[in-house]
Every structure is written in C-alpha cells, then in structure tokens.
Amino acid sequence: MRVAPPRGRRRKDDITCTSGNQLIWMVHLNKDSNQSERDNHSPPTRPSPKRNKASILPPELPPFESQTIGILWSKNGFLKDVALGPRYADVLQHSIFNSFWNSPSTLKEAYLATSAAYVQTQHDWHYHDNLEFQCSAVALKRLRQLNEINPNQLEAVSALGVCLVLFHIMTMTSSLHTILTFTLSLLAPWYPTLVDDPIINSHTHHLLFIHTIECLVRREIPLLKCQTTEEPFVDNALGLCSPLLCLFYEVCELSHLLKHNVASGIAEQKQSWSGILARLQRWDPTFPPSFHQEYCSVEAISMMTQARVQQLAALILIHRFMHPYGEEDDSAISKSQAIFLFLEQCFAATGTYPLHTFFPFLVASLEVTDVYQQLEIITLLTVRQKPFSRLFSQRLVGFLQSEWRNRYTLHKPYWLDRIDTLQNMVFLP
C-alpha cells in the first residue's frame, strides 16, 4: 500500500518531491559493461573471510555455540537485515567476524544473545531457558565493569556495544540509551584516532548514528561529533550521511541551548535557527568518483534515499521548533510528503526500504492529518517492516496513534515539547 502525497502548492524554500528524480537519475550515471553484474548482487569487492567460519572459531567453543554465533555472518539472514546492500554486508561480515576472532572471551555472550534474539524474531520462538536474555545479562555486566580502556580493547568494546544495541532493538528492553552513552563515553577519548581503523570506526559510527538521533529528538548534546573529511567518501555505517550528522550535532547544540534558555523570545529563537537552517537546506549528498563502480544500484538508491529523508526530517524538526502546530503547517506537510515519496520511490526501485529511515518516517507521519493516510501508515509499519524490527515497529504504531489522538482531541503541544515524559520511547535513525 502506497503512502501517497496529496496534491498541493509547493513553497520555493522547500525541498520538493521532484528532487526524488535524482534517485532514478543517479543509477544511470557511469554505466559500464559490469553494471548488470553489480545489479545481480555480484560479490563485494572488499575481501571477506573465505574459510568455513564455524570451523575456525576458537576451539574452546562447543559446537552449539559455534553454530549459533555463526548466524551473525549469514549474508542471506542477519546481514541482509542490517546492511544497506551486498557490499555493506561483506564489510560488516568481515568486521563482525574479525572482532570476535580477536576477543572471543569478551564478545561470546553478546554474540550468543544477538544471534538467539535474531532467531527469535524470525521464527517467534525462544532458545531453551531464554538463552538470549541470560547471555545479554552477562554481556551487559561485562560492559559495565569497564571504567576506562586501552587501545587494545577498542575493537572489543565497540563490537560489544553494537551487539548489545542490536539485541535491545530486537527485544525492546529498556537499556538502549544507557548502553549507547556508556559505550561511546569509553570510546570518546580515542575517537580522533579511529579513522585509521575501518572496523572500530564502523562500530563506533553505528552507535553514534543512533545516539545522535536520540539527542536530536530529546534536545541533548551528543557525546561525539562525527568526523568527516573534505573529500567525499562513503562511510561503512553512515553511507553518505557523515556530513549530515555533523549538521545534526549543531542542531542538537542549538536546540539544547534554546530549550534551557527560557528567557529568549520567539523572535530571538527564530533568528538563532536561520544559520543552521540555511546550511541544512543547501546540503547535498556527495560521493567519490568511484561510487557507481563500487556500489550496485540497490545500494546507490538506498544511500541517496537515506540521506535525503534524514535531511528532510531535520528540516521538519527545526520548522516545528520555530512554528508550533497551526502555524506554517503547509511547509511541514510538504516536507513530510516528500519523505513518503522518496521512500516509495526507493521501494519501487529496490523492493525494500533503506535502513536507518525510521526517524524520517516518524517525523513525517506525525505531520499527517488525513485519517486514511494515517491508516496507510499503520499498514505500512505492520506489513512491510522486517521481522528484525517487528517489536520496534509495534511500539512505533502505538506511539503514532497516541500522538495523533493527542493532537486533535486533547490539544496537547507538539510531541517534542513533551519529550521528557516519553522516557520509555526509543528513537532509531
């Protein structure tokens, strides 16, 4: 079912729905004789482990644990659900495998918990004695015992944090925010040096993306500002969104300041937003010259879609910081419908929605006033989402229904103004 945008006027200062044509246009650039092979999900160019993974795990692991952990590097299962495409799956497989090989004693319980939770999401059954929760408790205790770390522990700690975050996303338990902030606080002193280590950098950016979105919603300042370079590049965790995450950090700083500066007037706040708003509107995703040779069309479209809808979501948030419900609604609605159109174009072209687009979908949905479109949104979350995120999707459905009722029956203020009362809600990219 399509969440179709209604007809209406466009504002010249909006990013309009027509820019979605870039998604189709970009995949026709730099066509060469190898394009058909890339579109058929040819093997990624980055090297990955070629040996039988289960047979080369540390010998002290029993066969059951070895087989269970091996679920995490299945390209047709787990990696397919958590990676943007085949090249990303190859890089992620390599990093997951090598992290475990280097630190099995630190990561065993976290890997077992994540694998068991993933199986549970696919088949709706639990391992004997709730293996996933027993192992996650041990892994979480191991993380909390770390007060400070040395360079030799960076890879293990970052992988431990990623596994625990994935586990809590699949099970929707309540420790996600704590795990994110604690893990990033351990990695923060070393973050400037991580750019030279693709595995640790990838783990850290997975955590930082979620943490930044949480801070964006809760009007807090992230522990880290994403590192970027002058030359365009594709990040293994963030795709094309690295520069955008730097802008999100600035949004967080300003929104946090204005939230606690009760003396500032409306006019003063709007003036404060003008600079970051202009930079965010001007931002365009850029990619290196080899982009279309290295990534297949599915990955290219997914990354472009992800970048555009994240940008639009941030613009809607800033708009609502400046204009409450009932004021300049047309601009917010126009951007929200553009998000839906980008996502539907991506689904039509690739057969799936890109990863890390829950946040734009949420922000866009909260602007919808038409009851029939609201029903389409609920259907979309119920039918099309992957089992991996089923519990989160169910929570999102309840949150949306509650907020729609609050807006039109209880006349409560904008949801971000009540964010301190929504401590149990998780916000994912």
Image (cartoon, helix red, strand yellow):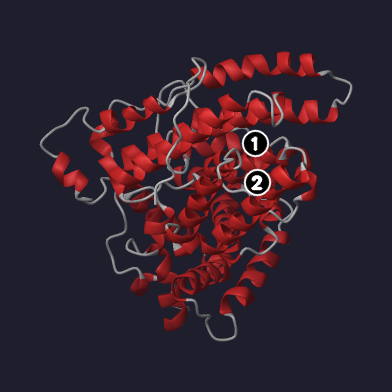
Instruction: Assign the C terminus to one quadrant of the image.
Output: top right
Residue 168 placement, left or right of 230? right
Rendered image quadrant of residue 167: bottom right
Judged from the image, the secondary structure of the residue bearing numbered disc 2 is helix
Q: How would you rate the neighbour count of disc 1 (Cα within 10 Å): few for under 14, some for 14-19, many for 20 or more?
A: some
- Provide the secondary structure element on which disc 1 rests: loop
Residue 311: x %, y % from top left? 52, 30
Q: Residue at x 75, y 44 (%)?
A: 419
Decide if residue 21 is on the left or right side of residue 264.
Answer: left
Residue 134 appears at what percent x and percent y? 63, 77
Give the residue number, with chain letter if any, for mark 2: 184
What is the three-letter code of the residue carrying label 2? Leu
Does the residue at mark 2 contact the one at mark 1 (Cβ under 8 Å)?
Answer: yes
Residue at the far left: name it.
33
Residue 370 visible in the shown view: yes
- The residue depicted at 53 percent of the width and 80 percent of the height is 126
Given the image, on which type of amino acid does mark 1 rest?
Answer: Leu
Q: Is residue 91 left or right of residue 160?
A: left
**What percent of the width, then of the height, locates residue 151?**
59, 47
Residue position marked by numbered label 1 in the rendering: 224
Residue 297 falls left or right of residue 414: left
Q: Residue furthest right?
A: 263
- For the residue carrying disc 2, how many other residues have a C-alpha within 10 Å: few (<14), some (14-19), or many (20+)? many
